[in-house]
Amino acid sequence: MKRFFLWFGVGFLVLIAALALAFKFSPWPSVFVFSQMFAKGDQATDAALARYVPPGIAARTGIAYGKGADETFDLYFPQGRKGALPTIVWVHGGGWIGGSTSGIANYLKILAGHGYTTVGVEYSTGFGSAYPRPVQQVNAALRYLLAHATELHVDPGRIILAGDSAGAQIAAQIALLGTDSDYAREVGITPSLKAHQIAATLLLSGAYDLDAVDYHGNYAWFLKTVLWAYSGTEKFLHDRRFRLMSITPHVTAAFPPSFISSGNGDPLEPQAVALAKKLGSLSVPVETLFFPANRQPALPHEYQFNLDSAAGREALQKMLDFLASVRAGEAAVSSTNAQ
């Protein structure tokens, strides 16, 4: 019996040592834990939004835009509406290593209720999936949407690129690809969208600059781990190709009109403020929603999905007002051109 416990103890210690080494030499054990946490958060968020979903929203889910199991999108639009509608293509968050369209489904239905076709794009986040694959996949999803625009109620000339958290970075990168041919060539991706097709961006709670990340603060280990996984290298800051994911240093005056917001308790808020400031300096139309630093309770990362809060409802309304102003501007330009 003593020998049994001895071997059991030795085996247990070996297992602990193996796990410690796995966490040290690979980001993926930690990423697995993070992804499970994201999944639970997605379920809770979507469930809380259910009571805000208006009636009469048609849904088409699991539409394949590629051959991969995770290369699908979900689409929503007002039931009974004929023809194309301005289309919001939303890229979900999850630290580039987790999350799913299921976590934003009800939010997209809410937006669809205001006269939009909304699309939630799925992309690869599992083991072995690294940059720039998710960007390539979202680009492929857009190519599919354009090719099937009529049957999907998509207006190919009024695409709104949107995203939250990591999805905001991906959406912004897609906008950059479509508005800067030099940047697209450097990244090595041929954009599906042309500049005139991108009506606007909605960028919520996002990260936009690798050099602006706090690698020594409270979230340092988490950020280093997910960026290691997403880049495919522990030395991601020295990877020239991966550094092109930074949005703020690369934006130009051709970037589309943008709505940008983050909560005052979000560690990524300074990045959102910096991006908005950079776009403003380039005379890009920008609408922002930021909050006083001393606001209590502080608004966390992804605050916009909490429609039980006044801040979440304000964000939704300001987004809709922003999109209405963009549409009004398009109508005014069309009227002028007609004359």
Image (cartoon, helix red, strand yellow):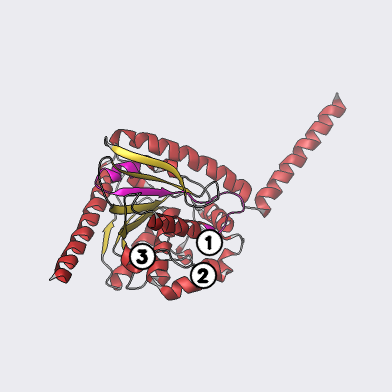
Tags 1 and 2 in contact by the CB under 8 Å rule? yes
Q: Which mark is residue 188?
A: 2
Q: In this view, does 98 lie to the left or right of 233?
A: left
* Mark 3, secondary structure of its residue: helix
Front-most of 166 and 278?
166
Q: Can residue 265 be seen in this view?
A: yes
The earlier-in-sequence mark between 2 and 3 is 2
Could you give the CA–CA distance between mark 1 and mark 2, rounded to whole angstroms? 9 Å
**Which quarter of the figure is the N terminus placed in?**
top right
Q: In which quarter of the image is residue 228?
A: bottom right
Residue occupying the point 28% across, 49% down: 116
Which is more foreground, mark 1 or mark 2?
2
Task: Please name the residue shown 69% across and 49% down the image.
Answer: 22
Measured as percent of width and height from the top left, residue 169 is found at 43, 59
Identify residue for label 3.
275
Asked whether 118 or 280 is in front, the reply is 118
* Marks 3 and 1 in Cβ contact (< 8 Å): no
Q: Of all residues shown, which one is farthest toward the bottom?
A: 182
Q: How crowded is mark 1: few (under 14 residues within 10 Å), some or many (20 or more)?
A: some
Front residue of 77 and 121: 77
Highlighted range, magenta: 107-133
